[in-house]
Amino acid sequence: MVLLLWNIAVNTMQMRIGGTETGAMAGKVLDVRNPATGEIIESVPSGTGDDVGSAVGAAGDACGTWGKKTPRERGTILFHAAQRVREQHKDLARLLTMEQGKPLKEALDEVRGFANILEFYAGLSSHSSGEAIRLGAVGDGIVIREPLGVCGAIIPWNMPVLIMGWKIGPALLAGNTMVLKPASTTPLTCLKLAAILDRAGLPPGVLNVITGPGEEVGEAIIRHQAIKKISFTGDTATGEKIRKLGSLNQKELVLELGGSDPMIVMDDADLRTAVEGAIRGRFYNAGQTCTAVKRLYVHEKIADHFTRELKDRVEALTVGNGLGAKVDMGPLNSAGQRERIAVMVESVRSADEGTIVTGGCEMRGKTFENGNFYRPTLVAGVEPESRLVTEEVFGPVLPVMTIPDLATAIREANNTRYGLGASIWTRDIGNVRRFFDEVHAGIVWVNRHLTVPPEVPFGGVNASGIGRENGQDALDGYSRTKTLLLGW
Ligand code: NDP
């Protein structure tokens, strides 16, 4: 019912400060558009630095009570919230598709993934308190973990729900409070989730969500002296700006930035599985995933056959409004993102840096005229200096290159400033061992790509960022140790 109303009248969904809904102090709003239709589905307040100040104040006030709860008490609230998210997962997924564009089946995965993350961290609550050390004649040491205080989170639009989970799960379980800024094109599901967490028992002020432009709200979060740690996911250039600003006021930083993940297919790979892996790895979420397959290297013995199979599968993908049944790929999240992709493909075409096997243009026809659709694209024989190889391609374009052997594959895989994920498709354990040892990446998959369960640490090397999210690592990163030495 609520969703129907949104189509008739545009509401303004409010920010959340101190557990209550509020508009922006300046009274301005940001419109949120459906990327499949161009329609405004809702507005949100365009927050300011003053709003960030209020949110940090509320988060600071909540620190004492939240930090003093036991990990098990905090974990119980996360469990309750996860349960409520599961109860409402269909409505949440629909909203996510409407603001982000991804097919409903992917949005459902993402919302369930959010619940999985909360449950995973809640499950760690009995293991997160500290340790005791016997020190012989010196005495005994007791090491406890205490929260950092108020933390800041800035999240992108590609996987807003999952990434919100990655940031709030460990931070809140460790006893911190948080000020979170969603991306301006995808704030709605994040606001709904924050309301669910509040209703599940999160005390007022523990999680505050401020909507508004990155340059204003995002930078105010980074500059605020009372915020101890920032976790950011987004563009490498924005991350670099944040690194400079954040280190000026000595904040701890986790930066999850871009990636240009290589996928290597050796000549002994199971080809059907590898073709499906490349399709999912590249075209899931219309290619807008940090760990998407962004460069595909196929062994020259199988390259022709592989590329033909891939072409058939790419052409069989159904593109459309993510709410439609049987849609495999939705629009890009914004007109700007589609433009970026179109410009990159044009640069390859005009410099003759590869052969466009299929796609290479916007989707045409009435269904697509107001949305940000781009045709799934395969480009073969791409030159190493092409922008499709040297930059992060955040859309449905897959460059394919051939390699004669593993040594060349590894050299090409490492020939990038990024280092987020990498995959190898082979049945030879020797290939796996060598690739794992030599490739520069935070995560290496074998015969799969993309999946990042909450249990495993996630993050990159080089221009892909600093720090880790997920797993026990992230939880440890949201606390510091304090030691009591007892002399007897
Ligand atoms: P941004 O890095 O600009 O956006 C990510 C988040 O940062 C958003 O919440 C944004 O807010 C916020 N932000 C923007 N500027 C600042 C700032 N100066 N200080 C603090 N926060 C800021 O990415 P874009 O949306 O511009 O996407 C550009 C490219 O970045 C993509 O094409 C892709 O290559 C890459 N990207 C990579 C992601 C990944 O997961 N690795 C995720 C998203 C993008 P607002 O929305 O209000 O601008």
Image: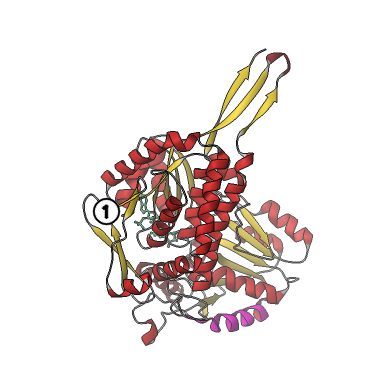
Is residue 319 inside the magenta stretch?
yes
- Is 420 left, or right, of 394 in this rendering? right
Report the residue marked by disc 1.
23
Q: Which x, y percent locates residue 67?
A: 48, 36
Q: Image point 73% across, 55% down: which residue?
A: 434
Mark 1 surroundings: few (<14), some (14-19) or many (≥20) residues within 10 A: many
Residue 301 visible in the current orientation: no
Q: Which x, y percent locates residue 174?
A: 53, 40
**Above or below, comparing residue 180 to residue 277 in the picture:** above
- Foreground residue among 470 and 298: 470
Residue 125 visible in the current orientation: yes
Instruction: Describe the element under mark 1 as helix, strand or loop.
Output: loop
Q: Give the range drawn in magenta.
A: 305-320
Count of marks placed on residues: 1
- Give the quarter the ligand 1 occupies: bottom left
> Cβ(mark 1) to ligand 1 < 8 Å?
no
- Is 164 left, or right, of 57 in this rendering? right
